[in-house]
Amino acid sequence: MAILVSIFIEIYDIIMPHTKLVFAIAFIILLISNTLTGLGVYLMTKSDLILDPGNGIVETLCKVLNRPFSYLRIRFDIMLVIFTCLSGLIIKHKIVGIGIGTIVSAYLIGKMVGISDKILKLNI
């Protein structure tokens, strides 16, 4: 899995800096990448693979609070965006590093995990 991810990152790093994308096309690419990321997160959590720290925290919260992963993933990601905004405002007196893509991703990845669960219903 890590090799596949690194291959896609390399392809992205080669292609994307040399393209001048209009907003609509860039937004479509964002939606596709968030959909695939949500599917990947779903498959990793369902197969009990070792999770990265962010997903591991959400998985632990799911077990403690008895809530679905997608429900808590959305809230956790939005909480991180809010924390980043507040940190930027306190330290730099402006919002730093948060754009439309960050906000969309904070919601959409968790939503795609939930949609993947409804469609696939894997019991691995």
Image: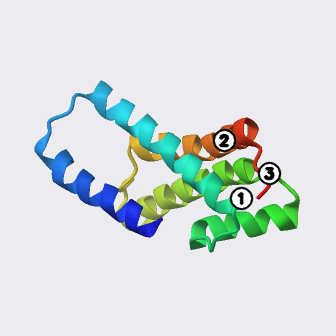
- Residue 24 sits in quarter: top left
Residue 113 position within the rendered picture, expressed as x and y whole percent measured from the top left: 65, 46
The amino acid marked with disc number 3 is Pro
Q: Would you say 20 lies left or right of 45 here?
A: left
Q: Would you say 30 lies left or right of 117 here?
A: left
Mark 1 vs 2: CB contact within 8 A: no
Residue 100 position within the rendered picture, expressed as x and y whole percent measured from the top left: 41, 39
Q: CA separation, marks 2 and 3?
A: 13 Å
In the image, residue 29 above or below residue 40: above
Residue 83 position within the rendered picture, expressed as x and y whole percent measured from the top left: 54, 60
Which residue matches tag 2?
116
**Coloring scheme of the render?**
rainbow
Residue occupying image coordinates x 25% and y 60%: 10
Residue occupying image coordinates x 59% and y 55%: 41
- Sequence-wise, the earlier of marks 1 and 2 is 1
In this view, the residue in front, 78 or 74, is: 74
In this view, the residue in front, 38 or 108, is: 38
- Residue 49 sits in quarter: bottom right
Which residue matches tag 3?
68
Residue occupying image coordinates x 37% and y 59%: 93
Question: Dot 1: within a 10 Å radius of its alpha carbon, few (fewer than 14), some, or many (20 or more) residues?
Answer: some
- Residue 21: which disc? none
Q: CA separation, marks 1 and 2?
A: 11 Å
Residue 85 position within the rendered picture, expressed as x and y whole percent measured from the top left: 47, 55
SS of the residue at dot 1?
A: helix
Q: Would you say 50 lies left or right of 33 here?
A: right
